[in-house]
Image (cartoon, grey):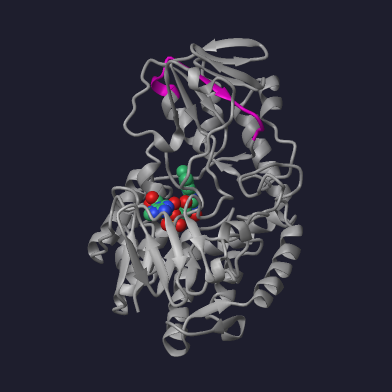
Amino acid sequence: MRVAIIGAGFGGLCMAVKLARKGIPHVVFEKGGGVGGTWRVNTYPGAGCDIPSHLYSYSFEPYCDWSRRYPGQQEILAYLEMIAAKHDVRPRFGTEVTELAHDGTGWLVVTPKAAERFDVVVTAVGQLDRPSMPDIPGMDTFQGDAFHSARWGARDLQGKRVAVIGTGSSAAQLVPPVAETAGQVDVYQRTPNWVLPKADGEFGPLTRAMFRWVPGAHRAYREWIFAYLENTVFPAFVDGWSTDVIRKMALVHLHREIRDPELRRKLTPGYPPGCKRIVLDSRFYPALTRPNVELITDPITRIVPEGVETSSGLRRTDAIVYATGFHSTEFLLPMTVTGTHGRDLHEQWRDGAEAYLGLAAPGFPNLFFLYGPNTNLGHNSIVHMLEAQVSYVMGCLDLIAERGQMEVTEGALSTYTTALNRALAATVWNRGCRSWYMTPTGKITNNWPRNARDYRRFTRRPRPGAYNFGTGR
Ligand SMILES: Cc1cc2nc3c(=O)[nH]c(=O)nc-3n(C[C@H](O)[C@H](O)[C@H](O)COP(=O)(O)OP(=O)(O)OC[C@H]3O[C@@H](n4cnc5c(N)ncnc54)[C@H](O)[C@@H]3O)c2cc1C
């Protein structure tokens, strides 16, 4: 059996390591020039995780030397590079998969250079890989440097006048360090976010030694973070006991850091906490009070060669940073995916992506999605979800070896989707906000509506009754 893995981020690497351990031949296709995915491309100043890294890392590769609770991009990337080197994962870099086509018994994986046949395909292309740019009149007329936050490269904005468009997690992380050296930073906000302080801190040599040498210490710490996030943050998404606690904590943080009542008013969200992803950052509010930073809430009318125009006039700028997120709901695009009988996956998903456990779709046998539809979390580690998915796929490979190629049934997907939608209806994600979790028509395609423990339970092993088995492997 040969398996194609598409993507070499947390998901693709995990899949490759598990396949290698079982001696199953596989190829990892990666369009970029290295491993790491999210953590290779998001090099903007201040980029880091908002889930403590002792949990935001593989359970089978515990790392005791994280320098701090919430490390930066470089340290997470170094961890992933270390994993790839240790397990000898060698992706085909610079190789974008443009098409997947089922030929009745297997998959043709098409790249600009070749087409190759595999029995099984596992996509690990992420939900936040393709930058989304806004559609503002005149964007192409701007004469300075304009770029997306995920395309920062090695820029230096020292002394420059900078416009940051957007106030989500990336903007909140990059505004404070940029403001330290830039001449002026204009932050353009459409909708305020709920912001909680980040309880970050360094791990000293003694703590690191304890994680390394005291039996069970590292594992206990991981489990404690996991349980804490499940039991305190998750309930807020389903209007549970912590909604008010989080709201109060965020308002206390806002009042403590922002003295100006007008600025405070502009920064106070009008929807429940958790509806959009909660920003976890202690430095964002203080940065907004710096003399060289201004929060602008007047809608942008157009971009002109010299800068950004709002209803209150032109603000000149040397650089525009679009911290405007990703094409999160357009799963697998721009790859074309053709299943049995010429079925087009994107046509099937035209009203919003749906997959059984986020992993499989009818009409597409032996094709599995990692971090697929409705498997994102607002409160816990995506690595936990990816590991659950990888172990599920490994179970599927055993079934395929025994019974032939497997395709989830329409009935299994429909029963699953009904339950999923019922659970989604009880969440705060459609209570008066627009977020990257939903399609333009308001369907929530990204988030898992239950806690992370439940997802692990549901994906413990594949249920053969949910699948049809056929010829081929
Ligand atoms: C700035 C930022 C901060 C984040 N912080 C957190 C956090 O704190 N906690 C958390 O749980 N999650 C966080 N996330 C979500 C994060 O994306 C996931 O946690 C995780 O990194 C996803 O891994 P992945 O392998 O599924 O996808 P990615 O890391 O996105 O990797 C996908 C890979 O697939 C490759 N690829 C895509 N299409 C193709 C193709 N057609 N052919 C070949 N290769 C392809 C890409 O080049 C990329 O390398 C964050 C995301 C961002 C953007």
Q: Quadrant of the N terminus?
A: bottom left
Q: Position of residue 451 (x, y in %)?
A: 62, 64
Q: How many marks?
A: 0
Magenta-colored stretch includes residue 117: no
Q: Which residue sits at x=57%, y=41%?
A: 279
For residue 283, above or below residue 80: above
Work out whether residue 46 can be spotted: no
Above or below, comparing residue 81 to residue 88 in the picture = above
Residue 336 location (% of width, % of height): 49, 56
Corner quadrant of residue 109: bottom left
Of residues 340 and 413, the one drawn nearer to the viewer in this rendering:
340
What is the quadrant of the C terminus in the image? bottom left
Is residue 153 rendered to the left or right of residue 124?
Answer: left
- Residue in the image at 64% along x and 37% along y: 193
- Left or right of 451? Residue 142 is left
Relative to 387, 115 lies left or right:
left
Q: Which of 364/353 is in front?
A: 364
Q: Quadrant of residue 227?
A: bottom right
Query: Which residues are the magenta region?
Result: 179-192
* Residue 418: percent from left, percent from top: 73, 68
Rendering coords of residue 133 (x, y %): 53, 34
Foreground residue among 400 and 77 = 400
Q: Can you see residue 389?
A: yes
The part of the image, by quadrant, that contains residue 29 is bottom left
* Viewer-nearest residue: 336 or 257: 336
